[in-house]
């Protein structure tokens, strides 16, 4: 008889199974939605728990469905990867939930051949909270600008065109502010105080346009402003 030592082959099989289990654990535990799609039929063949949770449907409703039903809702024949030849790499897309809602996602689609089949591995990250935050910030900015524009008091924001080291002596910091500071934003009321008609005319002018460092009260203001970490409130001065 012939005896063949298959220990190495068995060890390779064990290692392969362990690798498969390791990858499956990662895919199933990640917070990124992952689906595998048949590139020819566009049928969803696999979906991890996060993808199912985002879609809001059990596996039997998702696996076996055409991907356009949930992922990248395009018309048949208009798949961005297989039909249009597009690259989807961290692109903002939408997925459709089981109840018809649209969820913004950051999607990546990678075409891969596996076991003789052409597949698409699509991963997507839910951008819903990020979009809500961006919208809230946009509204805050609009409200801020509306408030500034409608205020009857002169308001301006200055910015330096260089870095001012806070380790410098106070008066040296003030000198740099005067030399490099400019009006980054202001309202019409401030512009009129400086002899301009509109805020746009004052924006970009040097800080010296709105302040005179030679006036003792202005110098006191600047020193207090710098010593307080570049912020000040309820400062009274007489000119």
Image (tube, rainbow, N blue to C red):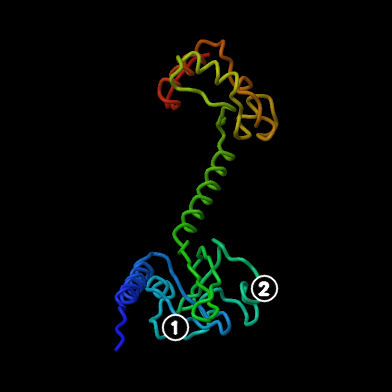
Give neighbour class at mark 1: few <14, some 14-19, many 20+ (Cα, 10 Å).
Answer: some
Q: Which residue is identified by label 1?
A: 63
User: Closest to the observer: 41 or 177?
Assistant: 41
Q: Is residue 40 above or below residue 238?
A: below
Give neighbour class at mark 2: few <14, some 14-19, many 20+ (Cα, 10 Å).
Answer: few
Q: Which residue is identified by label 2?
A: 84
Q: CA distance from mark 1 to mark 2?
A: 24 Å
User: Closest to the observer: 74 or 186?
Assistant: 74
Q: Is residue 21 above or below residue 42?
A: above
* Earlier residue among tags 1 and 2: 1
Residue 58 quadrant: bottom left
**Residue shown at 36%/73% (left/top)?**
16
Identify the secondary structure beneath mark 2: loop
Identify the secondary structure beneath mark 1: loop
**Residue shown at 44%/83% (left/top)?**
63
Question: Residue 24 at x, y = what percent?
Answer: 36, 72
Question: Residue 188 at x, y = what percent?
Answer: 63, 34
Q: Is residue 220 above or below residue 231?
A: above
User: Closest to the observer: 223 or 98?
Assistant: 98
**Residue shown at 56%/43% (left/top)?**
145
Tell me how many marks there are: 2
Image quarter of the N terminus: bottom left
User: Closest to the observer: 91 or 87?
Assistant: 87
């Amino acid at each position: 008889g012939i005896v063949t030592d298959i220990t190495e082959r068995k060890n390779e099989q064990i290692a392969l199974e362990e690798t498969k289990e390791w990858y499956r654990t990662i895919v199933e535990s990640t917070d990124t939605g992952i689906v595998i799609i048949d590139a020819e039929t566009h049928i969803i063949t696999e979906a991890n728990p996060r993808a199912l949770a985002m879609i809001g449907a059990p596996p039997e409703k998702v696996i076996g469905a055409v991907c356009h039903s949930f992922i990248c809702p395009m018309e048949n024949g208009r798949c961005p990867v297989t039909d249009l030849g597009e690259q989807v790499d961290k692109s903002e897309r939408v997925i459709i939930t089981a109840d018809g809602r649209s969820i913004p996602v950051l999607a990546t689609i990678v075409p891969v051949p596996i076991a003789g089949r052409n597949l698409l591995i699509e991963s997507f990250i839910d951008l819903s909270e990020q979009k809500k935050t961006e919208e809230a910030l946009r509204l805050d900015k609009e409200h801020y600008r509306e408030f500034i524009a409608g205020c009857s008091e002169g308001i301006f924001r200055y910015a330096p065109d260089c870095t001012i080291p806070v380790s410098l002596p106070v008066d040296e910091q003030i000198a740099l502010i005067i030399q490099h500071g400019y009006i980054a934003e202001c309202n019409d009321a401030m512009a009129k105080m400086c002899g301009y008609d509109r805020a746009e005319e004052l924006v970009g002018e040097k800080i010296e346009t709105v302040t005179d460092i030679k006036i003792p009260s202005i110098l006191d203001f600047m020193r207090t402003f710098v010593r307080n970490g570049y912020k000040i409130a309820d400062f009274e001065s007489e000119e």
